[in-house]
Image (cartoon, rainbow, N blue to C red):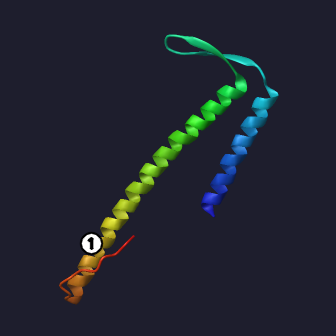
Amino acid sequence: MKSFIVTVLVALFFFLALIFGARNEQVVTISYFVAQGEFRLPVVLAVVFLSGFIISWFFAVYHIAKLKLALRTVNKKNAHLEAKLVGDSTPKEVDA
């Protein structure tokens, strides 16, 4: 449910950015370190929104993968300790 709400919010923000961009056909000047360029406002908004979304997605995937790896390690240790407690010589494999 939480991921559904987040997806709806992201889609809503993207839709609002598209509406704002469609109503503003102004040309904006973007200054880089060594150059500058003139772009239409909807293009700038779309590029900034998409790049921010992709960067956030990479960070989220990294942290989720790290947590899943830690959970898998803890589950394997738990299975090994349970097997040791029971007296079984071979620990059972546990998939997380």
Judge the density around disc 1: few (<14), some (14-19), many (≥20) Cα neighbours within 10 Å: some
Q: Hey, which quadrant is residue 88 in on the image?
A: bottom left
Q: In this rendering, would 94 be left or right of 9?
A: left
Q: Is residue 22 above or below residue 70?
A: above
Find the residue positioned furthest to the right: 23
Residue occupying image coordinates x 40% and y 59%: 67
Q: As rendered, which of 36 and 85 lies closer to the eye?
A: 36
Estimate the x, y position of residue 37 in percent, counting from the top left.
61, 14
Residue occupying image coordinates x 19% and y 88%: 87
In the rendered structure, which amino acid carries the disc numbered 1? Lys
Residue occupying image coordinates x 24% and y 83%: 83
Q: Hey, which quadrant is residue 91 in on the image?
A: bottom left
Estimate the x, y position of residue 61 in percent, counting from the top left.
46, 51
Estimate the x, y position of residue 92 in percent, counting from the top left.
28, 80
Q: As rendered, which of 93 and 67 lies closer to the eye?
A: 93
Q: Is residue 6 above or below residue 55?
A: below
Q: Which quadrant is home to the C terminus?
A: bottom left
Q: Is residue 12 above or below residue 88?
A: above
Say which residue label 1 marks: 77
Residue occupying image coordinates x 82% and y 29%: 23
Q: Which quadrant is home to the N terminus?
A: bottom right
The kind of secondary structure element at disc 1 is helix
Q: In this rendering, would 40 be left or right of 59?
A: right
